[in-house]
């Protein structure tokens, strides 16, 4: 039987605030356990939450970026469930009034734009971290509450994805949007970006969806995709054998690449949502909304399309440029100084990225500034150095941070454009290669290329290649 | 006059003038508590060392002619559901038997800043759930006027402490009448401020949208003094409002001439004890003599208040009390088989029956399929009840009614029937649902010699007016000066 | 509204409270009584009434994203029934 897979994703992203959602404790990752806690985030008797404005604005920003409808009135609710990493045994979240609803995100799959609808975007608090000791037979678990209360953005998509390519693009695009809007650092290895997938199958052409299975414990984008592939097969096998698929939550086992039923979630969840009485509603008026809106930069997909249309860049190159906001910003800063988009695009996507990769640099701390690269390009454009020399200068710039002109002068790399000097070298090359001259005269045109190369070699690449070409041809033809 | 019988204002004056030394006063109160409290059982813990240390500090300040706080040297008792840094705070629950908060409640901080002397923590119904203080996980507090009677609740310990001269003033909390009702039953003055007037930070939550810290004092002026210290916006409580705090003592004698007093007919219907009814009639006569106009009004949704309250308060409580799970603090069952079993045993062993009942009722009202029928329905009716008051306050300046339908009841009398107990709060609950302030003050005695309280309700943030109205009555009467003759036999321990 | 033993067992579990058989019986009776009393709310037509869950008329109470001091590890663990090293210790949790 042929099936169609239907996937929806729930995404949790920790917001990049300095303090937690309801208290002044630090959100810093990796500190000693239980040292970034206070009575509020430990859920001690008598404490009350106070909303972090920055967290709320970050959530708002993300909701706007995901094209959500923002209702003027927002409120918070308590979601009740018992878990030892949840200090109050309820999570302050949103249920009856979400911060943003009915949004969408466009994703690009095989050069086609697909629209995935966003059901809602809401703000909630993070739980602590539960640690299961590895020692055999341990009858206990350990809890670290440092993470408890970190602001968490939840983005719930509609089940609008039909294959792993779409899911991958959704995750990548969403990550980029969160990074572009600077609301989250999206470090998956630190758990600040997490996905949960809900997967159901239906017979090709059928209307009715099968039972939905939720998969948790997906620690990387790769595991999301693997889990979807595994689940699709598992569910299809069950259906083919005439079995039904249970509506349930399963845990992904990264090591064995399998999903398994989650034992603690066997009972149906009854979250008993009700309005959080310790917080007052938040009203987002037009003025506030506008203030947040202007802080949202052009988002990756729109930027990519603009780069293609306005600067006539290739699809591949623009993908590389917009992958990281900092690169695209770098690019735009450069062309403001010297209007040569294609040239800069090449420099950034080839040379700059190569330097970053080879030197294992952090993309957020690029070794060169736009005005420096622009200065280099200006020198090239004037014909003062050749492109080969330019690469050498660039490499030097990245290493030393010095201005290109200074490097060229110091290393005497300036291009030789003196006719007399070049002619002298040409005469020497011609007299040294009579056989090649013969070949050329017999019509072997690429013999000329060899001679040009020889001249460049003699001048250590500094001769102006255009002049070498012209003068050489004139000399031989004469 | 015995030293214990001074009001806070009198004591403060004598302390500042040097006539009474704070250390001596504190010692005497501690002594008094040690002698008398075994019979009253008002306190759960006594902070002797801390109190004496604080008293010595204040004494030094006075000797050095330094500035002292607004409550310099005045002894105060604190209900044991208000957090005190470094000192046991149990909520009268076994589940918090060993809990020592690492922080002070906002009100405790303010009391300390104003140089009050905290004598100890008082008994209550476990987690403030009750109207008799019989639901304490530790002890039963007795009414100083008659040890066979309950002191009211849930702040029964605080009310009894003030009534039995075991403190000059006390703090309590009022979710459905837990300050006003015990104040009435013990013959002292109790104020429940407007919701949002006093910070709840550090008050261990019961019904978060209803809870408010309130005061117990011997007279109205002391209530003004204490409210002055604890009222005002607090950054840590989002629901505390940045409304300016007026000088409550200034113009407290403004009188009631021309004032419109509303008498809600629903509060004087069947079920009201005759002695209480008669006392209230005298109250109204007195106010008319003082120049006020008494106007009949109606608060038509009053009869629904108890039902609404038991859904809203318990829904909130069910989630507020979910945190007592034996993980981070408090009691943990000694034996368990896995995490869920640990939760269940801890909570079953740690909570008393009334608390369990309310947690279950609350969870039921919020559970899947019942939310609309219970919680949401109650929230709508709550709005109607608030609307009743909004309408009334367009016609009148305040509302006067009994605080409790009966002058008191005996220990054990209502313990078997939770619903009957819930109906004890029928006159106090509506103010919590509407968030308005209320004050209860002594206004008579029953045939059995138990004190009777009257209640004055006002508009949001109009505590000052309530205090003026209360004071107008108090200065014309001497009910508040009557003292119980402690009739405890030593066997009643 | 009458509730039965099944309901009590369900809400007892939601509440993480363990009840003996006699307790279950008592609670069935008591909660049924209370719930029947609460039934009186159904006499009111509240379709047009907005639910009110808070009596203060204010919105947008927000704090700035400024660091405040946390508790020390010792203070954080002071009240804990069980700890192991820097952690809080609980009975084994099965996911
Ligand atoms: Zn904290």
Image: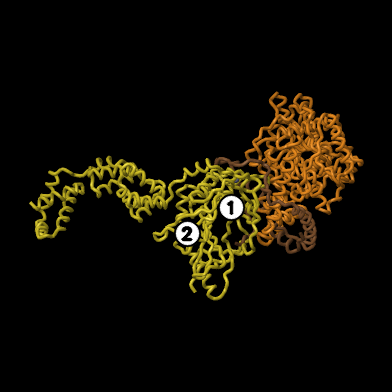
Chain colours: A yellow, B orange, C brown
The image quarter in which residue B356 lies: bottom right
* Residue C80 to residue C19: above or below: above
| Image depth: mark 2 or mark 1 in front | 2
Residue B304's x, y, as percent?
Answer: 77, 49
Asked whether B24 or C45 is in front, the reply is C45
Q: Residues within 10 Å of mark 1 (few under 14, many from 20)?
A: many
Q: Is residue A138 left or right of residue B42?
A: left
Q: Which mark is residue A221?
A: 2
Q: How many marks?
A: 2
Q: Position of residue B414 (x, y in %)?
A: 84, 51
First in sequence: mark 2 vs mark 1? 1
In terms of image quarters, where does ligand 1 lie? top right
Image marks 2 and 1: residues in contact by CB distance under 8 Å: no
Measure the alpha-carbon separation of dots 2 and 1.
22 Å
Left or right of residue A87, residue A458 in this image: left
Instruction: Indicate left or right for A215 with B13 as reference.
Output: left
| Picture residue at 25% right of the left edge, 50% below the top | A388
Could one spot residue B80 in this view of the protein? no
Residue furthest to the right in view is B447
- Say the numbered circle drawn on residue B267: none
- Residue corresponding to mark 1: A128
Q: Chain of mark 2?
A: A
Whether residue B197 appears in this view of the structure is yes
Query: Closest to the observer: A478 or B279?
Result: B279
Query: Quadrant location of residue A135?
Result: bottom right
């Amino acid at each position: 039987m042929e099936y169609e897979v239907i996937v929806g994703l729930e995404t949790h992203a920790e917001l990049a605030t300095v303090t937690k959602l309801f208290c002044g404790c630090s959100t810093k990752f990796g500190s000693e356990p239980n040292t970034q806690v206070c009575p509020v985030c430990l859920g001690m008797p008598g404490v009350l939450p106070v909303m972090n404005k920055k967290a709320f604005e970050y959530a708002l920003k993300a909701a706007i970026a995901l094209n959500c409808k923002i209702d003027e009135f927002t409120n918070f609710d308590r979601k009740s469930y018992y878990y030892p990493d949840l200090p109050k045994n309820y999570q302050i979240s949103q249920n009856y009034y979400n911060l943003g609803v009915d949004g969408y995100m466009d994703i690009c799959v095989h050069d086609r734009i697909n629209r995935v609808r966003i059901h809602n975007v809401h703000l909630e608090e993070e739980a602590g971290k539960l640690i299961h000791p590895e020692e055999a037979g341990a009858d206990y678990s350990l809890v670290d509450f440092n993470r408890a209360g970190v602001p968490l953005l939840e983005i719930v998509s509609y089940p609008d994805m039909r294959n792993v390519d779409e899911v991958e693009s959704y995750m990548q695009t969403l990550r980029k949007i969160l990074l572009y809007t600077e609301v989250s650092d999206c470090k998956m290895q630190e758990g600040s970006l997490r996905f949960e997938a809900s997967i159901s199958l239906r017979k090709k052409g059928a209307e009715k969806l099968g039972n939905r299975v939720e998969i948790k414990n997906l620690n990387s984008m790769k595991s999301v995709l693997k889990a979807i592939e595994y689940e699709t097969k598992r569910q299809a096998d069950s259906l083919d054998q005439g079995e039904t698929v249970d509506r349930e939550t399963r845990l992904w086992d990264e090591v064995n690449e399998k999903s398994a039923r989650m034992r603690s979630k066997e009972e149906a969840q009854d979250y008993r949502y009700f309005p959080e009485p310790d917080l007052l509603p938040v009203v987002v008026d037009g003025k506030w909304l506008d203030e947040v809106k202007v802080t949202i930069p052009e988002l990756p997909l729109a930027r990519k399309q603009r780069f293609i249309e306005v600067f006539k860049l290739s699809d591949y190159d623009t993908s590389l440029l917009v992958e990281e906001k900092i690169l695209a910003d770098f690019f735009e800063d450069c062309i403001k100084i010297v209007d040569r988009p294609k040239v800069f695009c090449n420099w950034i996507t080839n040379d700059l990225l190569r330097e970053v990769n080879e030197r294992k640099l952090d993309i957020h701390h690029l070794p060169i500034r736009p005005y420096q690269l622009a200065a280099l390009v200006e020198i090239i454009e004037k014909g003062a150095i050749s492109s080969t020399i330019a690469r050498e200068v660039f490499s030097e710039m990245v290493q030393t941070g010095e201005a290109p002109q200074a490097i060229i002068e110091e290393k005497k790399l300036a291009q030789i454009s003196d006719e007399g000097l070049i002619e002298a070298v040409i005469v020497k090359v011609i007299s040294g290669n009579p056989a090649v001259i013969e070949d050329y005269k017999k019509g072997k045109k690429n013999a000329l290329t060899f001679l040009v190369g020889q001249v460049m070699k003699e001048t250590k690449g500094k001769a102006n290649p255009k002049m070498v070409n012209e003068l050489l041809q004139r000399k031989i033809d004469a | 006059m015995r030293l214990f019988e001074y009001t806070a204002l009198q004591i403060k004056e004598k302390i500042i003038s040097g006539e009474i030394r704070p250390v001596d006063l504190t010692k005497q109160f501690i002594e008094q508590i040690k002698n008398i409290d075994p019979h009253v059982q008002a306190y759960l813990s006594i902070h002797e060392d801390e109190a004496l240390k604080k008293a010595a500090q204040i004494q030094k300040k006075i000797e050095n002619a330094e500035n002292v706080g607004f409550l310099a040297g005045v002894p105060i008792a604190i209900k044991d559901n208000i957090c005190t840094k470094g000192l046991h705070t149990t909520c009268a629950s076994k589940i918090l038997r060993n809990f020592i908060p690492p922080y002070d409640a906002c009100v405790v901080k303010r009391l300390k800043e104003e140089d009050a002397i905290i004598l100890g923590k008082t008994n209550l119904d476990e987690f403030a759930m009750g109207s008799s203080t019989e639901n304490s996980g530790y002890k039963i507090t007795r009414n100083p006027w008659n040890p066979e009677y309950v002191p009211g609740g849930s702040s029964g310990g605080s009310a009894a402490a003030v009534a039995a001269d075991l403190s000059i003033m006390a703090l309590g909390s009022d979710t459905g009448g837990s300050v006003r009702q015990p104040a009435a039953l013990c013959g002292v003055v109790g104020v429940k401020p407007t919701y949002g007037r006093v910070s709840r930070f550090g008050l261990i939550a019961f019904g978060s949208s209803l809870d408010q810290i309130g005061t117990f004092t011997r007279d109205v002026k002391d209530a003004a003094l204490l409210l002055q210290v604890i009222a005002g916006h607090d950054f840590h409580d989002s629901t505390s409002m940045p409304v300016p705090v007026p000088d409550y003592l200034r113009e407290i004698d403004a009188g009631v001439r021309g004032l419109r007093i509303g008498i809600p007919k629903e509060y004087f219907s069947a079920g009201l004890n005759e002695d209480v009814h008669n006392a209230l009639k005298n109250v109204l006569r007195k106010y008319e003599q003082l120049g006020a106009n008494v106007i009949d009004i109606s608060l038509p949704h009053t009869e629904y208040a108890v039902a609404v309250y038991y859904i809203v308060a318990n829904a909130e409580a069910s989630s507020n009390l979910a945190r007592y799970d034996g993980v981070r603090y408090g009691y943990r069952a000694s034996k368990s088989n896995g995490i869920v079993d640990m939760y269940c045993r801890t909570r079953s062993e740690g909570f008393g029956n009334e608390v369990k009942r309310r947690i279950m009722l609350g969870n039921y009202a919020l559970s899947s399929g019942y939310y609309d029928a219970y919680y949401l329905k109650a929230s709508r009716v709550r709005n109607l009840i608030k609307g009743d008051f909004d309408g009334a306050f367009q016609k009148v300046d305040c509302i006067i009614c009994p605080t409790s339908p009966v002058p008191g009841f005996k220990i054990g009398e209502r313990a078997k029937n939770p619903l009957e107990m819930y109906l004890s709060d029928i006159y106090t609950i509506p103010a919590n649902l509407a968030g308005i302030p209320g004050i209860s003050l002594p206004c008579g005695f029953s045939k059995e010699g138990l004190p009777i309280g009257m209640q004055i309700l006002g508009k949001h943030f109009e505590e000052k007016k309530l205090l003026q109205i209360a004071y107008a009555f108090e200065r014309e009467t001497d009910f508040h000066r009557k003292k119980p003759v402690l009739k405890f036999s030593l066997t009643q321990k | 509204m009458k509730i039965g033993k099944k309901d009590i067992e369900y809400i007892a579990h939601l509440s993480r409270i363990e009840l003996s058989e006699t307790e279950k019986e008592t609670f069935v009776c008591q909660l049924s009584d209370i719930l029947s009393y609460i039934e009186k709310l159904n006499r009111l037509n509240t379709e047009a009434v907005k639910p009110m869950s808070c009596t203060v008329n204010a919105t947008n109470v927000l704090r700035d994203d400024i660091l405040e001091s946390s508790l020390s590890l010792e203070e954080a663990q002071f009240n804990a029934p069980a700890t192991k090293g820097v952690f809080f210790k609980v009975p084994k949790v099965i996911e």
